[in-house]
Structures are given as structure tokens and as C-alpha cells.
Amino acid sequence: MVKAVLFDMDGTLIDTEKYYRIFWPMALKQFGYEMTDEQALSMRSLGQPYAPQHLKDMFHDPDMDYNKIRAYRRKIMEEHLEKVGIELKPGAIEILTYLKEKGIHRAISTANDIERAEKYLKKIGLYGYFDKIICAPMVEHGKPAPDVYEFACSELKLAPEECMAVEDSPNGVKSAYSAGCKVVMVPDLTQPDEELKKMLFACVDRIDEIKSIV
């Protein structure tokens, strides 16, 4: 029986993953690097310490200043979101309302920091739906390591097998699967490959479709 559903945020509950695809290449270009779309997609949900090393390996530059590039990416992306706003993914309100009514715990397990996660959730009216907000900086290793999901389960005082994780990206799926959660993927920018499909409890087109399997 599922006692809690743990949600990724970007690309799963809010339609922001597409902006990382735009603003990572823009930020890197500012510092003299040309990033392909495939490389940008590989950054989804990638946490510390993996993201800095991944970028350095992709561009064969061990001296790349990841923190400076990331700070610029965050700046230009935040400026854009202030102008255009943040959109909810279809079915987000419906599934959160359903779970709350059924007494099933809800938590966020995101690669973001707590300040940004809380800011976005409050701005779109989702903050009050969650029992816990777990962010990657709270643990030693970000996604695709299992730490963020293991910590979320421990904070809810539940075993991983009692929890369902909802993710949109490969790194997020790998994180939740490694933690021992039942993983449901709601593909956003890419569909799961054969390797990823083996990790999934289910794959749905809309997030509110998990009503039938929770």
C-alpha cells in the first residue's frame, strides 16, 4: 500500500524543465562554450557533486568555473520567469487534491534549494499541499544518487517501498529507484529508453493518471 507520494518539482509539477534546456546553453555561451540540446537535456535533475563534474567532462575543461556559470544561468532564468510566470503541469492540482483527501502523505523531493522550491510552490499555490519539502542541499549527494529520496522517506517515517516517487527525467528516476521507491514517470522532454523502463512501476502521460495506481 502506498502511504506517501514523493514528487519531483521541475518538469513534474511545474513546467520549468524546458527553461533549463534554454538557459544552460545561453549561460555557457556567455563563458565561451557551445552546448548542444542533447548536452542540455543531460543536466536535468543532476545534483551535486555530479553536475560540476559532468559539465567539466563534457567540455573537457577541468578548470571550468561551474559555480559562476550556474549563478549566471540562475540569474537569467529567474529574470525570464519573473516576466512569463510559472505554469503548472496538467493534472497537478487534481492529483494533489486527491491524495490529500485520501490521507496519503505528499512530499517534494527536488534537486533545487529550499529557498527556490518554497518560492515557486508558494507562487503557484501548491505550498500548502505538502507535508515535507526535501531539497538536494539537505543531503550529501544529489540526484541520481538515492540520498534525497531516502531522506524524504525517513522524514515521513516510512519505508521506501511504502512510497511512490513521481519523476519526469532519467536522473530523477534513477535516484528514486535506487532508494527503493515505486517509481512512476511522467515524461516531459524525453521518453524513457529501454534501460529506464525496467526501473519504472508505471509510465503515464499526465500526472493525475496515477490516481488509478496509487
Image: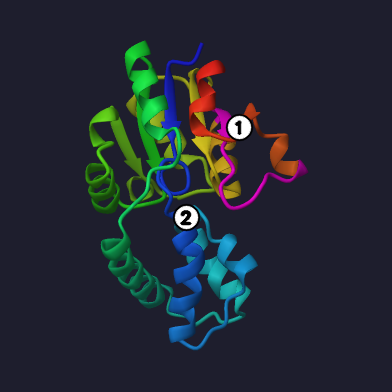
Q: Is residue 8 magenta?
A: no
**How is the structure coloured here?**
rainbow
Viewer-closest of 106 and 148: 106
How would you rate the neighbour count of disc 2 (Cα within 10 Å): few for under 14, some for 14-19, many for 20 or more?
some
Q: Residue at x 54, y 61 (%)?
A: 43
Q: Can you tell which mark lies on residue 162? A: none
> Which residue is tagged 2?
17
- Residue 214 in view (yes/no): no
- Residue 35 in view (yes/no): yes
Q: Position of residue 123 (x, y in %)?
A: 23, 47
In the image, 149: left or right of 117?
right
> Which residue is tagged 1?
204
Q: Amino acid at mark 2?
A: Glu
Q: Amino acid at mark 1?
A: Val
In the image, 49: left or right of 120?
right
Q: Position of residue 87 (x, y in %)?
A: 37, 48
